Structures are given as structure tokens and as C-alpha cells.
Image: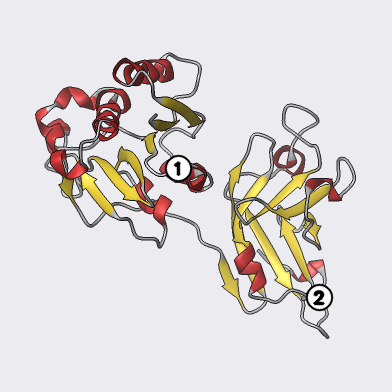
Amino acid sequence: MQIITLTTDAGLKDHYVASIKASLYRQLPNAILIDISHDIRPFDSSEAAFQLRNCYTDFPDGTIHIIGVDSEPKIAEASIENNQQNFSPNYPSILVFENQYFIATDNGFFGAFLGDKKPSAFYNYLAIHEHLEMLRFTTKTCLVPLAIRIAKGEKAEQFCTAEENFKKSLLQNPIIEALSIQGHVIHIDSYGNLISNITKEDFDRFGENMPFTIYYHNKTYHLVKISPTYNSVILGDKVAIFNHAGLLEIAINQGANKGNGGADRLFGVRKGDIIRVDFEPAGSHKTINTLAF
């Protein structure tokens, strides 16, 4: 049976997700549909890429991922200002990567998802010029039909055009200096946990035994160790861990936004805020007052 995942910015208040699923089931009644998230911030292709990067390896070969985030294409026929100098079209596209299919509009998602990795193939669906009705509710009217064609065994090159380039969303990478890493909060999950773009690999380059201090929300809060689990600290205490994706995460043990409040609310931290790690080699002297953001 064909596994198809759905990632959208449509939310669950309205009928949109149900309509997308109904369209898939009508032609693929035995498909297995899995929701990754429908709470992506509207039009935020980088957030959609973050969610997919953290779970696509759990799926088997042949899985089809539909990403309905900022999905309306930009093509000349539909542009009121198609004579503007900076007009850059984008199309519904299919990415083949690690034996899986990713179907989205080329709005920066693919570049954010891949990072420095290379795809097996990339295709644009240029035939949308002949089907302008697909510009309305594009996830349902275009991305779903593309997924169905792949699921039924058609090759992407039979109805799409191979391309080498795709757009890239702007990603914030950590700044690594001689004795520090400056990163950012790139995601706040439903518990209110602060997930940064600082990786365990970034940490490890400074050595296993070098002391450090993690600062967040300017100088207001800091941590001096990485714990193996949330429960390594007492209930309600702050904790830093490397999560399952190898990203530095700051949380409150059993704190959650539907309970007593997660780390984002209690610490006043928002997406995009700085998280800084200062390392202290043997013989150095450093205090919290030396930090300058």
C-alpha cells in the first residue's frame, strides 16, 4: 500500500485538509495517509522543511510527501504584474531524494529541506500553463494529482521537465568562532521547548571536556551542562539536551504550554532569538557579565 504524508499550513479549523484527503482516497482508496503537521506557520516553507527533515528517514522507500505550504505557483499567465523586472516564476515540482518523493511548489522548500545534500532528481510541472484552474487550491488541484500519478507508477519524467536548480529559503546557520557558537531558536514545539540550529556536531568540535555556558534570552538565563534526558533534572527545572535530531534544545522538565507553561512562555523566548554557547578552556576566567549580544 502507498504511504502518502501531508504537511500543510491549512490548520484544522476549516475543511481544507479533509478535502485534500478525500481527493486522495477517491483515486487511491487503499492509500495510507499520515499527517506530519497542518500547523505550519502560514507560507513558512523553512518551517515545513524543518518538520520533514526530522522525520522523513522514518518512512520506507517509495513514500510520497505532499507539502502544501505557500503552494500557489507564480507563473506569467496568472501574474497581474508579469512585466515587473524581478518576476521569478515558480512551479509545482517533484524532488526525488533517498528513494522518496517530495511534491511541493518550488518556493524555497526544497533548498531548505536539502541543505547541502544533493537530490537524485528534480522536476518542474510546466504543464500547469495549460491548466490554470490548478492555481486555485493548488495543494488539492495540482499537488495531489501529481502524487496520484507517481503512486500509480508513472515516472516523473513522463509528465514533468527535469531541472537542476531550485529556490532556497533563507536559513540561519550558527556562527562558530574560536570559543563560541551563536545560534538561534529555529522552532518552538507544542510543549514550548526551544529548538536551536546548534548541532551536537558543532559542540563536539570543541572537545568533550571543555566547560561551557549556554546563554539565552540575552544574559537572563544560562545553563552549564547538557543532560541526557528531560528527567535528569527535577520537575519544573530548566534543562538542555540534544534532541533526537541532534539539535540543542532548551526545555523545562514537564513544562508545557497547556499546563504550567513551556520554556518559551516562562523564559520569554521567541523564534529567532539568540542562543549562545561560550566555551572556557582551562586557565581562562569568564563571567556572565562578559557576554555581549
Outermost bottom residue: 283
Q: Position of residue 42 (x, y in %)?
A: 44, 32
Residue 28: quarter of image? top left
- Give the numbered dot on residue 60: 1
Q: CA distance from mark 1 to mark 2?
A: 49 Å
Compared with 242, 213 (above or below) is: below
Compared with 5, 122 (above or below) is: below
Q: Residue at x 11, y 33 (%)?
A: 129
* Nearer the observer, 155 or 45: 155
* Amino acid type, mark 2: Lys
Residue 156: quarter of image? top left
Element carrying mark 1: loop
Q: Position of residue 271 (x, y in %)?
A: 59, 45
Outermost front residue: 1
Element carrying mark 2: loop
Residue count near mark 1 (Cα–Cα under 10 Å), binned few <14, some 14–19, many ≥20: few
Outermost left residue: 130
* Amino acid type, mark 1: Pro
Q: Is residue 235 left or right of residue 14?
A: right
Q: Which of pointers 1 and 2 lies earlier in the amino acid sequence?
A: 1
Q: Contact (CB < 8 A) between labels 1 and 2?
A: no
Q: Residue at x 41, y 42 (%)?
A: 45
Q: Nearer the viewer, mark 1 or mark 2?
A: 1
* The C terminus sits in image quarter: bottom right
Q: Position of residue 8 (x, y in %)?
A: 43, 31
Residue ID for mark 2: 286
* Nearer the observer, 149 or 258: 149
- Give the numbered dot on residue 96: none
Q: Residue at x 32, y 28 (%)?
A: 139
Residue count near mark 2 (Cα–Cα under 10 Å), binned few <14, some 14–19, many ≥20: some
